[in-house]
Image (cartoon, grey):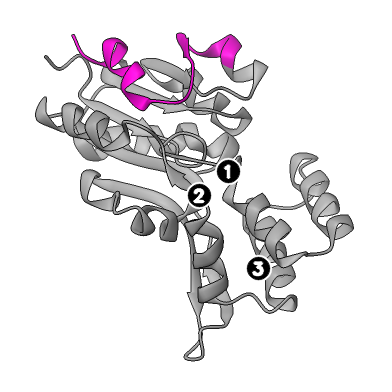
Amino acid sequence: MRRFDLIAFDVDGTLVDDTVFVWKSLHDHFDTDPARREQAWEDYFAGRISYAAWFRNDIELLRERGATREGVEEVIASMRLMGGAEETLGALRETGASLVVISGSLDQVLRRFRLERWFDHAWLNRFEYGPDGALVDGVPTPFDVGEKAAGLRHAARLAGVPMARTAFVGDNFNDVSVARAAGFSVAFNCKSEALAEVADVVVPGGDLRAVLPYLLA
């Protein structure tokens, strides 16, 4: 039986495993400048640059190292679908709940694991490639880190669902704001003490089906 009318999911570390953040996996694979990565990280969290500027910095670092669609796909292929992900999404869909993704990951990750078919909406970052497959640009998600809560409120308005009837499942520090905003939140495969403190329940990783007892009535 349906307990929540809208359930939002993170991607990296939640729907897929063997990565903490796809961005870190990409930077490590293409061996981008760690000092410039760290500076952009510090600048964003200090409020000196916007999320879009942080995203553009990452794009530029990857372009400088010759990132291509094929190379990005190689990184994503080294990841794996979280155990029980398909079964979990299917069980929630059977209740009639609306499912959405609110994540700082890439839309390519959803496509690689054929997950997009489960979701009514998916807000993620997107890469753009040239005719030769080279990474040339991208479109940042409007909803990551602190803005994930705004993403959930936006999804709830689209679905006509009160926030009390929403739930969120995520794993890391950038999920804290949305975990606070959701009617119910699950810290699954949790890597952040801050998230564990605000989530309604903490569930060990390994098999996403472990969240179902908390999301079904």
Three-letter amino acid code at the position of disc 2: Met
Residue 142 in view: no
Which residue is most to the bottom?
131
- Where disc 1 sits, the SS reads loop
Q: Which residue is mark 1?
A: 19
Give me the residue at 38% from left, 25% from top: 207
Vertical placement of residue 74 versus 13, above or below? below
In the displayed structure, 98 sits above or below 141; it is: above
Tell which of 45 and 16 is nearer to you. Answer: 16
* Residue stretch in magenta: 196-217
Identify the residue under disc 3.
Answer: 59
Percent from the top left, x then y, of residue 48? 80, 48
Amino acid at the residue labelled 1: Thr
Q: Neighbour class for label 3 at 10 Å: few (<14), some, many (≥20)?
A: some
Q: Quadrant of residue 30?
A: bottom right
Q: Is residue 193 left or right of residue 126?
A: right
CB under 8 Å between callouts 2 and 1? Answer: yes
Tell me the SS state at disc 2.
Answer: loop
Which sits in the foreground, 13 or 172? 13
Measure the alpha-carbon separation of dots 3 and 2: 21 Å
Q: Secondary structure at mark 3?
A: helix
Toward the viewer: 28 or 106? 28
Mark 3: which amino acid? Ile
Task: Identify which residue, 83 or 131, lies in the foreground.
Answer: 83
Q: Say whether residue 203 is left or right of residue 193.
A: left
